Image (cartoon, helix red, strand yellow):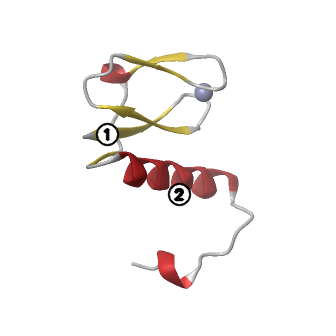
Amino acid sequence: MYLIFRCDCGRGMYAKEGVATRKCVCGKTIKVKTRRIIKKVEDYQTASDEVRDLQEEKYGGTFFTTADKVK
Ligand SMILES: [Zn+2]
């Protein structure tokens, strides 16, 4: 399982379940257990998709939603 969460800077991140810390690109080291977990997903691919969606949500995104993303 992979855990989806946000850094304090607002960036979406993921970590493999069981990993204690994760370093954000902003330089902050996140203790995974102390974060509010937004979502748990099965695999790496889904995790990276979720993080990308979080980024677009926060920053407005420069991409329009495409038909294949509509659930
Ligand atoms: Zn950060």
Q: Looking at the rendering, in which quadrant would you find the N terminus?
A: top left
> What amino acid does circle 1 point to?
Tyr
**Residue at the image point whose x is 55% and y is 28% from the top:** 8
Task: Specify the quarter for ligand 1.
Answer: top right
Q: Amino acid at mark 2?
A: Asp
Q: In the figure, 31 relative to 24: above or below?
A: above
User: Residue 7, percent across and down?
Assistant: 52, 30
Residue of label 1? 2
Q: Secondary structure at mark 1?
A: strand
Name the residue located 41 percent from the left edge and 52 percent from the top edge. 45
Farthest residue, direction right: 62
Q: Which residue appears at 33% of the width and 16% of the height? A: 20
- Side of 36 relative to 6 (left or right): left
| Residue 48 in picture, x, y percent from top left | 47, 48
Residue name at image x 69 percent, y 52 percent: 59
Which residue is identified by label 2? 53
Q: Are marks 2 and 1 in contact (CB under 8 Å)?
A: no
Q: Earlier in the sequence, mark 2 or mark 1?
A: 1
